[in-house]
Image (cartoon, rainbow, N blue to C red):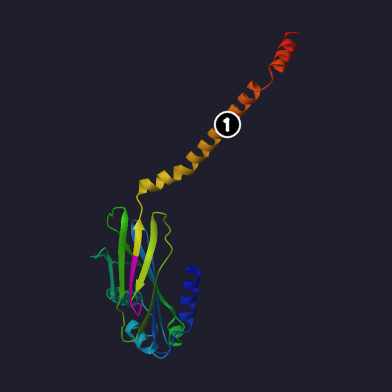
Amino acid sequence: MALGLTALASTSASAHRRDEYLQASRIAIDPERLEIELDLTPGIAIAPGVLAEIDRSGDGVVADGEAHAYAAHVLSGIRLEIDGQPLPLALVTRQFPALESMRNGEGTIRLALTAAMPPLPAGDHRVFYRNDHRRDIGVYLANALIPASDRVAVLAQRRDVDQRELTIEYALRDAGERRSRWWLPGGVAGAIVLLGGVMWWRKQLVRSTSRPFAARRVGWMSGRK
């Protein structure tokens, strides 16, 4: 399923229409933080307008200040919540392609965002994500990534029709519970080995006590010789 969603997103990104601003979000949930990868690809028909928003000086180069200002503008249109409470997002990295590739409808802006999770108890939780950047021309994709931590298990994903909104239901396991499960395989293996040894000892005892008395007596007499 994960591979299928990735393939679908890649196909959509490469085949989006000329007059659309494709915005694909991938969300990774960790016990301590939440990370978002956001790719923005303007179609060739709308690229000049998007470039005008980015390159404010009009010199054909995306300066650091212009890249930062546009990334902040995108960030201002994103809403993120954990269990109904707002979760502040911060920009980690930004990558802007050459303006010429964007004019051809091929360049993709890549933003990496992160948010620190508040202390959460073990149990079920809900992440809500909404992207309102350039609703007039935007088309959206949103998916949860497979968690890297075994303490997190994604239970369900719900989207609106436009995929501007994504709700992720997930379960958070207690850290102590995770450690106890690590010890479980070793404990079970040790118990199996111990049980096997006991069964072998009992089997040998039964064999020795079930031999005929005469045979045992002969063996005893042979021992005396």
Residue at the extreme bottom of the image, as rendered: 45
Q: 189 or 204: nearer the eye? A: 204
Q: Quadrant of residue 206?
A: top right
Give the secondary structure at mark 1: helix
Tag 1: Cα neighbours inside 10 Å, few (<14), some, or many (≥20)? Answer: few
Image position, residue 174 (x, y; %): 34, 50
- Res. 33 visible in picture: yes
Image position, residue 85 (x, y; %): 23, 64
- Where does label 1 land, which residue? 199
Q: 216 or 192: nearer the eye? A: 216
Q: Quadrant of residue 220?
A: top right
Q: Is residue 138 left or right of residue 12?
A: left
Q: Is residue 148 magenta?
A: no
Residue at the extreme top of the image, as rendered: 225
Q: Residue at x 65, y 23 (%)?
A: 210
Image position, residue 137 (x, y; %): 34, 86
Q: 214 or 103: nearer the eye? A: 214
Q: Residue at x 68, y 21 (%)?
A: 211
Q: Which residues are magenta?
A: 160-168
Q: Which three-letter amino acid code belongs to the residue tagged 1?
A: Met
